[in-house]
Amino acid sequence: MKAIFLDHDGVICLSNNWAGRSKKWAKYRSANPVSSREKKDAPVFVRFDDFDKKAIKILNEIIEETGCEIVVSSDWRLHANLEELGDYYISQGIIKRPIAFTDIFKDIFPKEWNAFRFRADLELERSMEINHWLDNHPEITHWVAVDDLNMSLEFLSKYFSDNESDKNPGLSNFVLTPRSSEGIKQSGIKEKIIKYLKDE
């Protein structure tokens, strides 16, 4: 099985769409004044910003060319269950539903979570979540993680001394989308992703 670990913000939900959920929420509450004031109780389309249409086109091309499955590594997994997010993917034009979420760092590494609060940023946590998922899914033959957080081996090496280099949790199969306004649309990104997912 081939898997793409997919972040949303800065990858397929671009900066020009950010804050769209606030408008959706206001419109929804206006139309449904007696509904719950909790956003988690609102329909899934109200909870999230829209995905970029061109980014979705590129993601669909990657899926069609490689046959990969989607594992959501984005923090959006904290605000919907897998079925709800799958419905949102389909409504936004993605041709496949995600098959899984990565597990939450503080649940799988509670001791490290307390320590890392003072040592590192989200990059370290998310890379460890992805590595943990891979360790528990040996059926994965090809994979790539795509994110606007730099989770590369090189970047995360700054958190480890030379004698700890074998503990570096950075990702070898990683593609960075550094411009949040372009995400997966950035020149050369699609080709880098496909290279990791293609048969050797």
Image (cartoon, rainbow, N blue to C red):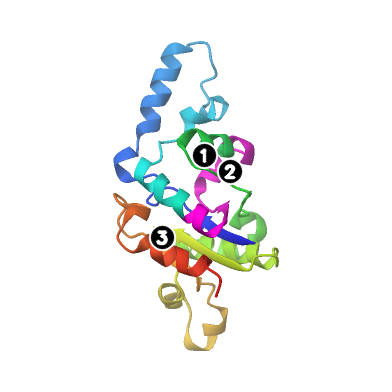
Three-letter code for the amino acid on which mark 1 is drawn: Tyr
Q: Which residue is mark 2?
A: 97
Secondary structure beneath label 3 = loop
Distance in Å between CA atoms under marks 3 and 2 = 23 Å
Disc 3 versus disc 1: nearer the observer = 1
Q: Is residue 136 left or right of residue 86?
A: right
Above or below, 153 relative to 113: below
Q: Is residue 152 left or right of residue 4?
A: left
Give x and y (percent) for residue 64. Answer: 51, 53
Q: Which residue is mark 3?
A: 149
Q: Is the C terminus in the top left, top right, bottom left or bottom right quadrant?
A: bottom right
Q: Which residue is mark 1?
A: 89
Q: Are marks 3 and 2 in contact (CB under 8 Å)?
A: no
Three-letter code for the amino acid on which mark 3 is drawn: Leu
Give x and y (percent) for residue 25. Answer: 42, 24
Name the one closer to the observer, 40 or 136. Answer: 136
Disc 3 versus disc 2: nearer the observer = 2
Distance in Å between CA atoms under marks 2 and 1 = 6 Å
Q: Is the N terminus in the top left, top right, bottom left or bottom right quadrant?
A: bottom right
